Amino acid sequence: MTKTLTRVVPTAQTQTSQAVVGCIETLNQGYEFLDNLQPEDYVYIAQPHVSSSIGEHFRHWLDLFHAIRLDPSRIDYNVRRRGHQVERSLEVAKQEITELIEWLFELPNSELHQAVAVETEVMLSQTHVEEVSSTFVRELTFAALHATHHFAMAKVVASIRGVESDSRFGVAPTTATYQRAQ
């Protein structure tokens, strides 16, 4: 059974972590944004303003979630799928988002605070991979926040193409909290 993708949020009865709810909200935002695009919008590169297409931005943040899902005890953020079909196909991106939402719905709360090792490159001038300690829920939170950053870039490209986006798309949770307080 597929979960409805419009504003999917687990109920309080499901005992789901608010961090996981936030990830699902983020993934839903991405899916809904894609629903407003045409295939040519998804692959358009808005040089000189933005050097990557919306599809490339989506592939990048999806790669972070995939790294977490692939091995939740040892997350390697250096594993990237540059040139993958998800960069060129709205439908592939939507399918990946759907699968990630399904995975998040099934995550047991007991696993969220487990320690994980994280590998990531840390230097621009040379290749150097650093391993750091984290928790599973911290890395899920990071992936969602990083997606929001890429949503902001995708929103710029979409606006150049004349595509309107939801005003909350690409807005960080802390910014939304600030705006609600105004």
Image: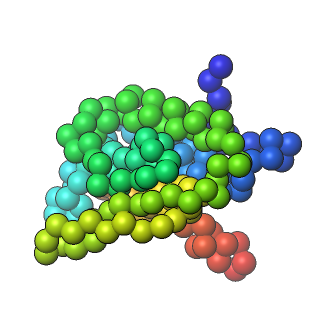
How are the residues colored?
Answer: rainbow
Residue farthest toward the left in the current orientation of the protein: 125
- Image point 37% across, 30% down: which residue? 92
Residue that lies at the very extreme toward the bottom in this rendered image: 182
| Residue placed most toward the observer, 133 or 27 | 133
Residue 31 or residue 63, whichever sits in front: 63
Q: At 21% across and 69% down in the image, what residue appears?
A: 128
Residue sitting farthest toward the top: 1
**Residue 120 position within the rendered picture, expressed as x and y whole percent measured from the top left:** 32, 63
Quadrant (top left, top right, bottom left, bottom right) of the N terminus: top right
Question: Is residue 102 toward the left or the right of residue 33 in the image?
Answer: right
Q: Percent position (x, y) of residue 157?
A: 31, 55
Outermost residue, right side? 13
- Residue 54 place in picture, x, y as percent: 32, 48
Q: Is residue 52 left or right of residue 177?
A: left
Residue 169 percent location from the top left of the image: 52, 56
Q: Is residue 70 visible?
A: yes
